[in-house]
Image (cartoon, rainbow, N blue to C red):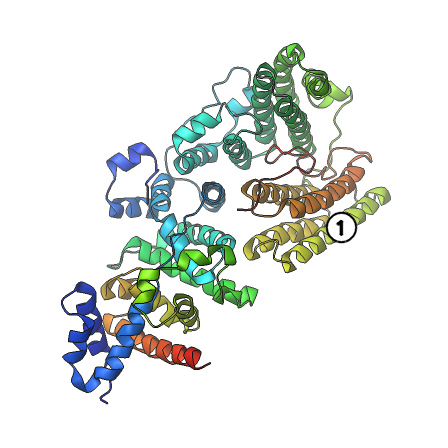
Amino acid sequence: VQDQGTPGLARQDDDEAVLVDRAAAGDAPAFAALYDRHLQQVYRHVYYRVGHRNDAEDLSQQVFLQAWRAMPRYKRAGAPFVAWLLTIAHNEVIAFYRKSRQTNYLEVEPETRDLWSDPEAQALSQFDRLAVRRAILQLKPEQQQVVMMRFIEHFEYSAIAGALGKNEGNIRVIQHRALNELRRLLAHTVQS
Amino acid sequence: MTRITPELLAACLSDVETGRLGPEQCVAAHPAEAEGLQQLLEIARAIPAAPPVVPDSAFRLRARVALVEAMAAGSEPRVPFFTPWWAGRRGLSGLARAPIPAFALALALVLSTTGAGAAYAAQDALPGDPLYPVKISLDEVQLAFALDDEARAGAQVARAARRTEEIQKAVEAARPAAAEEASRSFVAAVEQADRHLAWASAAGKQVAGLEARLSEDLGRMHPRLAAAGAAAETRSAITAAAQAAQAGLGSKKAGAPRQVSDQKGQSAFEGNGAAKAADAAAAAEIEDLKGEIERIGEQGGVPGQSFQGLMSHLRAAEAALGRGQHQVAARNLEAFLNQLNAFQQSGHISPADYNALHQSYQALEASLQGASATPPPRDAGGGPASGGAGGAGNRPVSPPGRR
């Protein structure tokens, strides 16, 4: 992500940990720099879950609002800052599902369907990419979160554990259950 | 088939991910679990990456402004503030004095989002230019962080000053549509400045000095507007702007002393039958507007969270009207209009939906102004900005197409 933050700030504090500490202390420009760094990743993550640009925008905005409010309580726990943002994103998406009671997030909006196509990857797989996404979104929220962070964001187990407040063993168990459930859901899809 | 443990699966996934082993090698290394392991590895490999979606610049800006609002509302900023760029302008006395640390923060954050170069370039943009929305966003941020009505009045006069420059440049560039748009925005800004001064006065503030200074500021704009030659079709709009500048604000314009309501900012119409009828009419208009949003929302024309935001502003305004708190109602309606205009500018809603909502909003505003026409005239909740947000004027516009 291109960092368009305050030039002086970017020059002086390239280290994210410094920015995070300053933001936690109430330094708004530091938080703005973190916003610039991570907005795109948060947006893409949320978009993956909701499948619509406008909803992804609204929810991404909420993520950063919530993050700013929670910054004074933020504690580094071995996880990247963006992993913490993604846990907030996860909670926002779950709340969005609950409030809106809509299931159309299982489908992506027609104008962005071609963004999901990857003929090379598709050729190597027996599964349709959108069918896999749909199956992921039918997992339990905790399983969704681990699958997203592990296989889409490519975080280490330790980082996921730190972000979710669990130990690495827990994360491996959740991952195991999630993949087994995906297998069941996809088998059902193929049969139907 | 032996049960696959979470540890075995995790180890195999890591081996494949890091390239230490291929999937086939990993499966072959665990023959008792081979079948199930192969299926799970295949599923893990089939998980699609996030598509290459990129948040557009309009959204980045909108989100940044919302973030700034939350920062300003949620806690006392703890970073040093700087003097905003316009504070040193000659003649903008109300602005220069206003306590507006949050605007400094806002400006820094907007510049950070748009890129300082874009924001700088936008300073010369005219209505219709691609960068004009950036310039208007800076106006909005400035208004959002004016902390009281006196500061807001000053911010509106500063906005009028910027419109004056635009009118001159548009005339020089032979761009009548831009000149007309800027002229309408000028008049709307002066009207809104007048309202804020009235609300401040109604709240018991001594505004005579500020009113005189801001009127003087407007008076300095008058010769520039009067001298702006223009084609006939633009002339009337610029003349209206020049007259507004010459008339000034408040009692200077009306030639009558300002009337003051109670100190708590509550309605001055308690017990006033005409005002209660106006309130009832306004409440009915709010109901209509809510119904319109629900209808559009059901058709998918207003995205979920946006729908909730618009509705929450209306509900808050409705509740405030019910309590007789017209200023609170007006604040919420102003927020509603700002959000609606932001959606319009970003293409968040369709032109047809925007125009429908804007027309309903205008009906609501007319109801509120009906209340304000009943003496005492100024603390009737006067209604939100007439085109105060987005420079769109008080009329439907043709917004950019949906993304």
Q: Nearer the viewer, residue B365 or B148?
A: B365
Which residue is found at the position 44% from the left and 30% from the top? B119
Q: Where residue B122 appears, x then y in whole percent?
A: 48, 27
Q: Secondary structure at mark 1?
A: helix
| In this picture, residue A17 sits left or right of residue B84 | left
Quarter-of-image position of residue B44: bottom left
Q: Nearer the viewer, residue B389 or A24?
A: B389
Classify B37 as above or below A105: below
Q: Amino acid at mark 1?
A: Ala
Q: Where residue B258 appears, x then y in whole percent?
A: 74, 26
Classify the position of the N terminus of chain B by image quarter. Answer: bottom left
Q: Residue furthest bottom?
A: B1
Q: Where residue B124 appears, x then y in whole percent?
A: 50, 23
| In this picture, residue A19 sits left or right of residue B385 | left
In the picture of the structure, the residue carrying the numbered disc 1 is: B283
**Residue B326 seen anywhere in this rendered image of the structure:** yes
Q: Chain of mark 1?
A: B
Q: Where residue B295 appears, x then y in whole percent?
A: 69, 57
**Residue A46 seen anywhere in this rendered image of the structure:** no
